[in-house]
Amino acid sequence: MPKKDSRLIIYEKMTQLIFYSKNLTAKFPKSERFDLCTDIKENLYCNLRNIIYAWKEKNIEKRAEYLTKVDVDLYILKTMTRLSYEYKYITPKNYMVWNEKIAEIGKMVGGWLKTCQKE
């Protein structure tokens, strides 16, 4: 069986997070679907785009720049999930699972950033 590239794993995790997030945001009140839901979805797709850019980028400095953008956007996404929880759009369990998924991707991004700094 061929060995998987670790950057491919982060891509898979991000697509799983998008799927999970879209399922959760579909349950938000109609008034939030064009506000908070839209912001969450834009953030997720921007993160996915920057992960792909970082994966394809040969220049280490530019790669680190893309990964830093992902790191910042993940922090913003955590804030949006917190808002969703505070407004009671999601349950405490949904909040925990959602944040765990985001944190897992954040750890992968942090590790990838460290390897960029070593090179």
Image (spheres, helix red, strand yellow):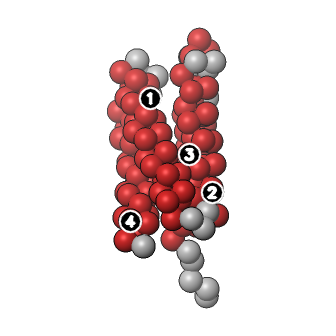
N-terminal of the two: label 1 or label 3?
Answer: 3
Residue labelled with disc 4: 117
Of the pair 45 and 2, the residue shown nearer to us? 45
Q: Distance between the residues labelled 1 and 4?
A: 29 Å
Left or right: 107 as drawn, with respect to 38: left
- Identify which amino acid the numbered label 4 is placed on: Gln
Q: How far apart are marks 2 and 4 (CA)?
A: 19 Å
- For label 3, the crowd category at 10 Å Cα-Cα, with few meaning under 14, some 14 to 19 and many 20 or more, is many
Where is residue 100? Give x, y as percent: 38, 48
Where is residue 54? Give x, y as percent: 57, 58
Left or right: 26 as drawn, with respect to 89: right
Residue at disc 4, secondary structure: helix
Q: Distance between the residues labelled 4 and 3?
A: 20 Å
Q: Distance between the residues labelled 1 and 3?
A: 14 Å
> Which marked residue is nearer to the observer: mark 2 or mark 4?
4
- Identify which amino acid the numbered label 2 is placed on: Ile
Residue labelled with disc 1: 80
Of the pair 25 and 9, the residue shown nearer to us? 9
The residue depicted at 61 percent of the width and 26 percent of the height is 38
> Which marked residue is nearer to the observer: mark 1 or mark 4?
4
Task: Specify the label residue 52 is tagged with.
Answer: 2
Task: Specify the label residue 47 is tagged with.
Answer: 3
Residue at disc 1, secondary structure: helix
